[in-house]
């Protein structure tokens, strides 16, 4: 089977840096994706890691360690609009297996 | 706007009824995926179609079925509805096999079973 673990909630202040961790156990693994979802909205793609290391896209970075079955999403220079749910997802033969999501609350 | 459209936006129906949710993928995308998101839950993969053929199946109930038509739009049929089927149903589309394998999600259909 497949399972992903990520914290349910994280709180940080505006301008700070926050890291959202994700550990996974899957029978097959092609890569780890991250999606953002604002309340009631559609999930939107943030990043994808297939190989070990760091991928940077503006204020967001994502890291993967395949040997540790672990990844994280790093959000820098937090803004109020970053308050949302963040999902890690394992790419498995084309489909995505999502974690339960981490709700990030950014405070002024 | 992801380019993926879903109708209807909201649906309220009674237990035991049957509903059909419709999805039109982005232009050029051959893959369509259906996900269910219950209150405070993650996204549960239901089923994937690629160019009209079923490609992958998740934990989709036998009461649920889907298909993808020649024009690539897809429909998810939910029958014998139960209260627990109340959820947000998302459709996503993608260009199969293209890095970074991004899936584009539609705005969702909120189903309420009473």
Image (cartoon, rainbow, N blue to C red):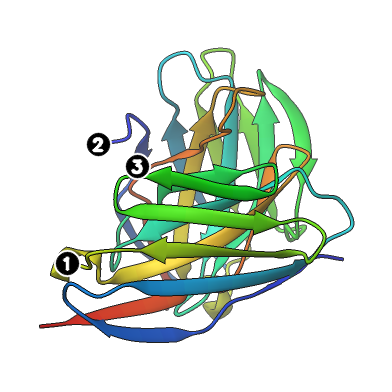
* Quarter containing the N terminus of chain B: top left
Whether residue A101 is visible:
no
Q: How far is the residue under mark 3 from the one under mark 2?
A: 15 Å
On the picture, is A1 further left or further right than B19?
right
Secondary element at image label 1: loop
Secondary element at image label 3: strand
User: Residue at (29%, 53%) from the top-left corner?
Assistant: A59
- Of circles 3 and 1, the one toward us is 1
Residue B110 coordinates in the image, percent (x, y): 37, 61
Local crowd at mark 3 within 10 Å, few (<14), some, or many (≥20)? some
User: Residue at (62%, 49%) from the top-left corner?
Assistant: A53
Residue B57 or A81: which is nearer the viewer? A81
Which residue position is annotated with label 3?
B7
Secondary element at image label 2: loop
On the picture, is A55 further left or further right than B54?
left
Q: Is residue B58 above or below residue A55?
A: below
* Numbered mark located on residue A79 in the image: 1
Q: How far is the residue under mark 2 from the one under mark 1?
A: 22 Å
Chain to which the residue tagged by mark 1 belongs: A
Residue B49 coordinates in the image, percent (x, y): 67, 31
User: Residue at (53%, 29%) from the top-left corner?
Assistant: B94
* Numbered mark located on residue B1 in the image: 2
Whether residue A56 is visible:
yes
Chain to which the residue tagged by mark 2 belongs: B
- Of circles 3 and 2, the one toward us is 2
């Amino acid at each position: 089977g497949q399972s992903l673990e990520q914290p349910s909630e994280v709180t940080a202040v505006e301008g700070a840096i926050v890291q959202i961790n994700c550990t996974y156990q899957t029978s097959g693994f092609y890569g780890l994706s991250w999606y953002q979802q604002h309340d009631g909205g559609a999930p939107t793609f943030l990043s994808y890691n297939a190989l070990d290391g760091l991928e940077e896209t503006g204020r967001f970075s994502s890291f993967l360690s395949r040997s540790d079955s672990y990844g994280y999403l790093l959000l820098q220079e937090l803004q109020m609009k970053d308050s949302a749910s963040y999902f890690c997802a394992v790419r498995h033969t084309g489909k995505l297996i999502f974690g339960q999501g981490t709700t990030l609350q950014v405070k002024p | 706007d992801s380019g993926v459209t879903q109708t209807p936006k909201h649906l309220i129906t009674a237990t035991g009824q049957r509903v059909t949710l419709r999805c039109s993928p982005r232009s050029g995308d051959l893959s369509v995926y259906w996900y269910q998101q219950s209150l405070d839950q993650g996204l549960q993969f239901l089923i994937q179609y690629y160019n009209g053929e079923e490609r992958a199946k998740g934990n989709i109930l036998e009461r649920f079925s889907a298909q993808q038509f020649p024009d690539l739009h897809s429909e998810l049929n939910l029958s014998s509805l139960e209260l627990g089927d109340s959820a947000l149903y998302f459709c996503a589309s993608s260009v199969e096999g293209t890095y970074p394998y991004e899936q584009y999600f539609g705005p969702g259909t909120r189903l309420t079973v009473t």
